[in-house]
Image (spheres, rainbow, N blue to C red):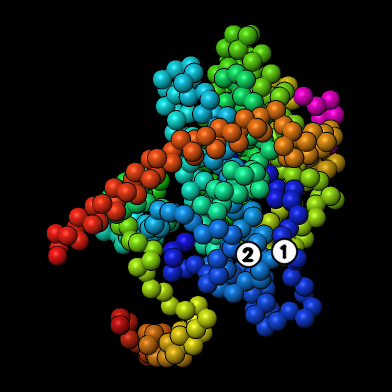
Amino acid sequence: MYTQSMDTQSAEGQPGKADGAGPEEQRFQATVDAEGKIEPRDWMPEAYRKTLLRQISQHAHSEIIGMLPEGNWISRAPSLKRKAILIAKVQDEAGHGLYLYSAAETLGQSRDQMMDALHTGRAKYSSIFNYPTLTWADVGAIGWLVDGAAIMNQIPLCRCSYGPYARAMIRVCKEESFHQRQGFDIMLSLCKGTAEQKAMAQDALERWWWPVLAMFGPPDAASVHSSQSARWKIKRVSNDELRQKFVDATVPQAELLGLEVPDDKLEWNAQRGHYDYGDIDWDDFWRVVNGEGPCNKERLAARVKAYDDGQWVRDAAMAYAEKQKAKRHKEVA
Amino acid sequence: MSEAEKPGGTGGGTPPVQEWPLWEVFIRSKQGLDHKHCGSLHATDAKQAIQMARDVYTRRNEGVSIWVVPSAAITASDPGDRESFVDPMADKIFRHPTFYDLPDELKHM
């Protein structure tokens, strides 16, 4: 699963200036220009570090919060097979969160600091997880559409200039394909089922389509940080390009399912070789990003509760490890 | 991801209260191959680190053997010295077999 474009927040640092860059910065940019990788202890501009730290930690938070809407359905999955698959998928998301937190930690922020930023609302996560999962078909729609959008977004990130992030993304992308297919498989089963089941699938598509398109982030014309991120080879493909790619890939899949994409303006444009699509409700997007979505409060509260409820487990595990260590020291002495 | 790879400065803010130590994970993908670094994780002790590494890094048969090493135990070379550190090896091209011109008549060597 993926977080939307990171252009939704202002950068904490100022983009590095090309003019008057010191020898270190010139060497850094030369490495990036030559498609080389930057590793944790290499010199990097402070703004590059901050941009990455913000993007990677928000990406990690999205993986963790993303477990909540689907986790809701584990106990209600329609069969043992679907339940086992869903558990495996949610477990993958936890793993993705961990790979990403580890990558972010190399930039000099502790896990606890990142957790704290999430729990106090200072850090954002993808707005898509602030929509509710009302029916089982939503679990299918999330896998098919949300994870499908994630793949579009994450594949170029495998070539990101920052080594640890690129390596984490390669691992994530390998696993993501299963997520999309299991979602499509749920949709396919529903569409082959009773009229009621098919209506459920249609309803889920209608509710998720527009939020998923918005997930790619604001239109290129309104994106503030894209050019700097592109120069640093953090973001290689623009929001609008990714969105178009997603629409082009997904519309034929909907047709195959026999579902109707909820967009009157959706039409194949032979001249462009792409689908034209309607206007995205950016007001809704910003409302959700800024905390007024249907589930913002619920998601964060569930996350904080899980963390607080688990505190005694973390404390006990640490106390046990220390006790064992003391015991070993005593035996040696 | 290792402690050794961490930059000098920290991100600022409050120091961790009691964060579990960081471990580096190495996986042997199959018998006969080297263990290879694949990532890191937090765990209270070595036993827990092994169990977590199994859950996190080998969910799809990625490995037959796991090593975990406390990140703090790794000593790394200094990236600032990279050029002078590696340079002395680069100019000794006679160490490579391709340096030597051999007569065409020589078929196998």
Residue tagged by mark 1?
Answer: A13
| Chain to which mark 2 belongs | A
- Distance, label 1 to label 2, CA atoms, is 9 Å
Q: Residues within 10 Å of mark 1 (few under 14, many from 20)?
A: few
The residue located at (37%, 88%) in the rendering is B95
Can residue A51 be seen here? The reply is yes
Q: Mark 1: which secondary structure?
A: loop
In the rendered view, tell whether residue B107 sits above or below residue A116: below
The residue located at (63%, 59%) in the rendering is A52
Task: Point out residue A47 in the picture as x, y percentages from the top left corner.
Answer: 69, 66
Residue range in magenta is: A262-269
Q: Mark 2: which secondary structure?
A: helix
Front residue (pair A212, B34): A212
Can residue B61 be seen here? The reply is no
Type of amino acid under label 2: Arg
Task: Point out residue A262 in the picture as x, y percentages from the top left corner.
Answer: 77, 24
The residue located at (85%, 50%) in the rendering is A221
Residue tagged by mark 2?
Answer: A49
Count numbered badges in the picture: 2
- Verify whether residue A177 appears in magenta: no
Task: Point out residue A216 in the picture as x, y percentages from the top left corner.
Answer: 72, 43
Front residue (pair A107, A223): A107
Q: Are marks 1 and 2 in contact (CB under 8 Å)?
A: yes
Mark 1 vs 2, N-terminal side? 1
Front residue (pair B66, B49): B49
- Res A296 quadrant in image: top right
Type of amino acid under label 1: Gly
Task: Give the dominant element type of the magenta stretch: helix, strand or loop.
Answer: loop
Q: Quadrant of the C terminus of chain A?
A: bottom left
| Chain to which mark 1 belongs | A
Q: Quadrant of the N terminus of chain A?
A: top right
